[in-house]
Image: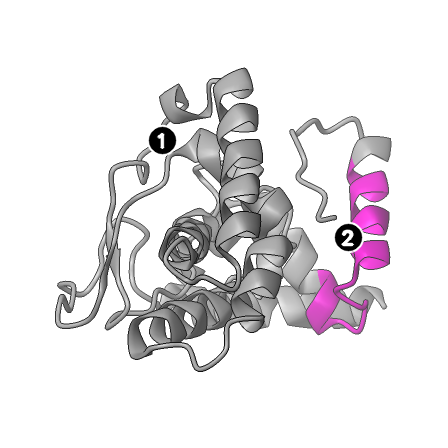
């Protein structure tokens, strides 16, 4: 597996070197539905409830275009972010996947707010909102910011991860290298990668997906 890992790492480096720089983005397309930003602190809480939010959305009969568009936006963003499973995606603003995850979870929050006006799920939506608001207040989530905390989004523009920054962010580089070399990008695979790093006395605040 060592040779495959080296080849995979080289492949990632070639792709990254030709990608867009971490600090730059193509000017945004604002022709779709605007989505308010979420703070760095809010992301961890919203991530815990993302499944519940989308489950409520699936119960809506004949959803109007706005709700359907918001749901589709967050679903596609979630896949683009590799399901937020790469270590550091939610907790490390230097992660190449952090901005992408901001867009994903801002979309999930927009879906939840939109569900308040749907009679068939209104009661459950308000109950879920109360739980999320309480947890955010308890953790001071609104006051924990990062470079993307003030960035709003739009359904007309999906965001890719900052692939050019992958070689500079070793948790992402390690995870993707293991994945490309045949090591499965599953919860088990990421957990194994974490144990490898810890065994070498390297420290990071890892995010583990539920």
| Residue stretch in magenta | 178-197
193 in magenta: yes
Q: Which residue does the image show at 64% across and 62% down from the upper left? A: 176
Residue 190: give its label: 2
**Element at badge 1?**
loop
Can you name the residue that lies furthest to the front here?
119
What is the x, y in percent for residue 34?
Answer: 21, 59
State the image quarter where residue 170 is shown: top right
**Element at badge 2?**
helix
Nearer the observer, 56 or 34: 56
As drawn, 38 above or below 72: above
Q: Which residue does the image show at 13% across and 72% down from the upper left? A: 31
Calculate the distance from the C-alpha at mark 2 to the C-alpha at mark 1.
Answer: 25 Å
What is the x, y in percent for residue 209?
Answer: 71, 48
Q: Main secondary structure of the magenta part?
A: helix
Nearer the observer, 60 or 84: 60
Residue 146: give its label: 1
Is 99 left or right of 32, judged from the image as shown? right
Q: Which residue does the image show at 72% across and 67% down from the upper left? A: 179
């Amino acid at each position: 597996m060592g040779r495959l890992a080296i080849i995979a790492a080289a492949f990632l480096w070639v792709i990254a070197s030709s990608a867009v720089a971490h600090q730059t983005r193509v000017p945004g397309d604002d022709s779709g539905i605007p989505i308010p930003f979420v703070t760095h602190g809010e992301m961890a809480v919203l991530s815990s409830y993302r499944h519940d939010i989308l489950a409520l959305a699936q119960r809506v009969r004949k959803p109007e275009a706005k709700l359907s568009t918001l749901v589709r936006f967050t679903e596609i963003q979630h896949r683009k972010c590799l399901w937020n499973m790469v270590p550091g995606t939610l907790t490390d603003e230097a992660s190449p996947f952090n901005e992408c995850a901001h867009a994903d979870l801002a979309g999930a929050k927009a879906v939840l707010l939109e569900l308040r006006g749907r009679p068939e799920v209104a009661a459950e939506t308000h109950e879920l909102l109360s739980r999320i608001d309480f947890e955010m207040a308890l953790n001071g989530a609104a006051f924990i910011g990062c470079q993307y905390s003030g960035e709003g989004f739009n359904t007309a523009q999906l965001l890719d991860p900052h692939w050019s920054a992958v070689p500079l962010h070793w948790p992402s580089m390690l995870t993707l290298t293991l994945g490309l070399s045949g090591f499965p990008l599953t919860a088990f695979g990421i957990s194994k990668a974490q144990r490898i790093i810890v065994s070498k006395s390297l420290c990071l605040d890892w995010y583990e997906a539920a």
